[in-house]
Image (spheres, rainbow, N blue to C red):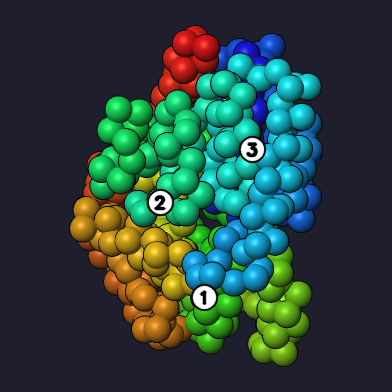
Amino acid sequence: MRVVLTGGGTGGHIYPALAVAREISRQMPQAAFLYIGSKNGLEAKLVPREGIPFQSVEISGLKRKLTLENVKTLWNFWRAVQDSKQMLREFKPDVVIGTGGYVCGPVVYAAAKLGIPTMIHEQNVVPGLTNKFLARSVSRVAVCFEESLSLFPASKTVLTGNPRATEVKHGNKQAGRDFLGIDADKRIVLIIGGSRGARAINEAVLSVIPQLGALEHTHVVYVTGEVHYQAIADELKKKAPLPENITVLPFVHNMPDLLAATHVLVGRAGASTLAEITALGVPAILIPSPYVTNNHQEKNARGLERAHAARVIVERDLTGERLLSVLSELLHDPNEWEEMRKGSLSLGMPDAAAEIVRQLQEIASKK
């Protein structure tokens, strides 16, 4: 099978595409891939690291009101469609899958116009503008939440879950502990703000570093995001020595292993993160980003809250003391933790990647 992958801007769009590629490779070792993204997006850095050929188009997002900038954006879209058609004619894919972000628009649209079977994957409860636009043209729409089924054409929409769930299912708990160099009796609290980090979470955590250091039988892994790492490292140097039970990292590449060993996660409510923790049954304290379209992260988080899989703290209410209080409750109440673990597992779809590959094979076979 020859597959074109597209998706970009954030890790939440890129990692699902890479998870699909890995599952296809597991099932079909001779499969060939091409990833089309933006040369300025995070995908330009992450995709080549996976050994997948990468090409780029120039594209930006439409504003939600009429502006002169939108005229330029529409021109760039048309040009990106033409560039995408040329790349697609040269690669001759059997199927094209888009996992979100502006770059999916011209690539998937071009594929549909060329008669190539296409799929889009919507990770969030509320779809973004790009996927709303593409839904009319594609062969199949895959969604992660039941609430999303009614927002796309019923005849072509399927519930698959997020392929990142499959990635973490293969995580090695012991490898995660070995990476940190900690004993098996230590609980791991993973604090992470997403691939780019989150300023509000970082500020809250910095304010309670001594208290986190005092948590018994607990090791805190604090992932700052590469953008914020140096500033936080400098700030920590001004304080007392970093407690021995706290590890500060800019980024984690072996996230499946680390998540497999995690007792409680503190972080944003991006779709990939939620897919990962529900596949493993990791209780969470979610702090949705208020800076996303349609406030979709809070909608994502509230779904876990209703299932008693997570506690939610909206950013305007976030303080170090509030975060520490909720975390302490979970660490000191094993019954509550166990109920949240069960609630999380009830939402998990660990076979999502395999289901997406099955759907891709089905639409490719109808070409």
Disc with the residue nearer the chain's start (3 vs 1): 3
Of labels 2 and 3, the one closer to you = 3
In this figure, which residue is indicated by the disc labeled 3? Answer: 107
Estimate the spatial distance between the alpha carbons at disc 2 and disc 3, rounded to whole Å: 18 Å
In the rendering, at what x and y percent does residue 73 appear? 66, 58
In the rendering, at what x and y percent does residue 29 appear? 66, 13
In this figure, which residue is indicated by the disc labeled 1? Answer: 201
In the rendering, at what x and y percent does residue 337 appear? 28, 57
Of labels 2 and 1, the one closer to you = 2
Residue at image position (57%, 36%) is: 109
Q: Nearer the viewer, residue 269 or 203?
A: 269
Q: Label 1 sits on what residue type?
A: Ile
In this figure, which residue is indicated by the disc labeled 2? Answer: 127
> Against 289, is 80 above or below?
above
Q: Label 3 sits on what residue type?
A: Val
Corner quadrant of residue 158 = top left
